[in-house]
Amino acid sequence: TFVVLVVLASVKGGGGCNVIKGTYVIQDRDQSAVSEDYRVLRSNIQNQQARKILFVSAQKGNSNALTALNTGVSLAYAGKKVILVDCDLRTPFLSDMLNIRQIGLSEVVSGDRTLEEALQPTGIENVSILAPGRLPIDPFTILGHSGLRDIFGELEKMADYVLVSSSPLVMGSREITSDACALASKVDGVVFVLDSRVVRVKAAKKVQALLQRANAVFLGVVLQDLPEGEFS
């Protein structure tokens, strides 16, 4: 049995936005279509009770990291304090977008650094980030750590929203990672990011089933680059 997911937003391409390392980042008061799409997403997220939110995708690439980043920026423009957490311990797109790859989550979990020491500014007002830090051989040693739930709880005390990005659940036609499943029960809700250009229905259903078994609370789905006229 599959949960019928609410469409939180349909996000178009990145025209009219700032570019950081080839990544589109929305600007305050910008009137581009993509900025408006993220304002719709922001409004729908603010209508939820969730403050710790995991963004997960069903395909390789940076679609969920990009969505988490721009959602965080949009919330910050609305006066909210946001902490981004890059839990992609395989290919940390979110941190790479912001050119932040020093200390982070791994050092906090190991006790080498405090949370306050590991949090870093992004250069965007009201948005800070907890980078992955040292990448482990096995991501589950960090993502499955018993103290991670407490770390997320502490971050929640520091911000209005904690937005988490993970590695995609489907890395290839036959390769599945369980990283997001380890995180799903540690957050308030999950946003499912689907790139309409590459996602396959079979892969999307597989991801949804995996997250359901991990007791994920689905907030809804974000459709990226949906062809004009297919969603309104």
Image: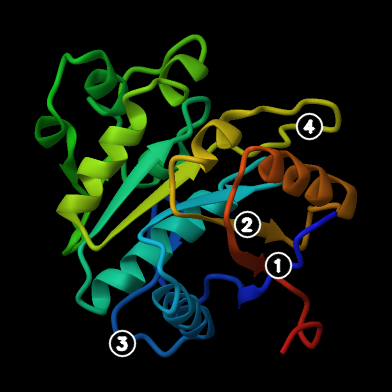
Residue where numbered disc 4 is placed:
172
Q: Give residue 29's mark.
A: 3
Closer to the N terminus: mark 3 or mark 2?
3
Closer to the N terminus: mark 1 or mark 4?
1
Quadrant placement of the N terminus:
bottom right
* C-alpha separation, residue under disc 1 versus residue under disc 3: 30 Å
Amino acid type, residue under disc 1 in the picture: Leu
Which residue is painted at 51% across and 30% down in the image?
Answer: 91
Which residue is painted at 75% across and 84% down in the image?
Answer: 231
Q: Nearer the viewer, mark 3 or mark 2?
A: 2
Which residue is painted at 69% across and 46% down in the image?
Answer: 212
Amino acid type, residue under disc 2 in the picture: Phe
Q: Are marks 3 and 2 in contact (CB under 8 Å)?
A: no
Residue 11, picture quadrant: bottom right
Q: Position of residue 168 (x, y in %)?
A: 63, 39
220 or 66: nearer the viewer: 220
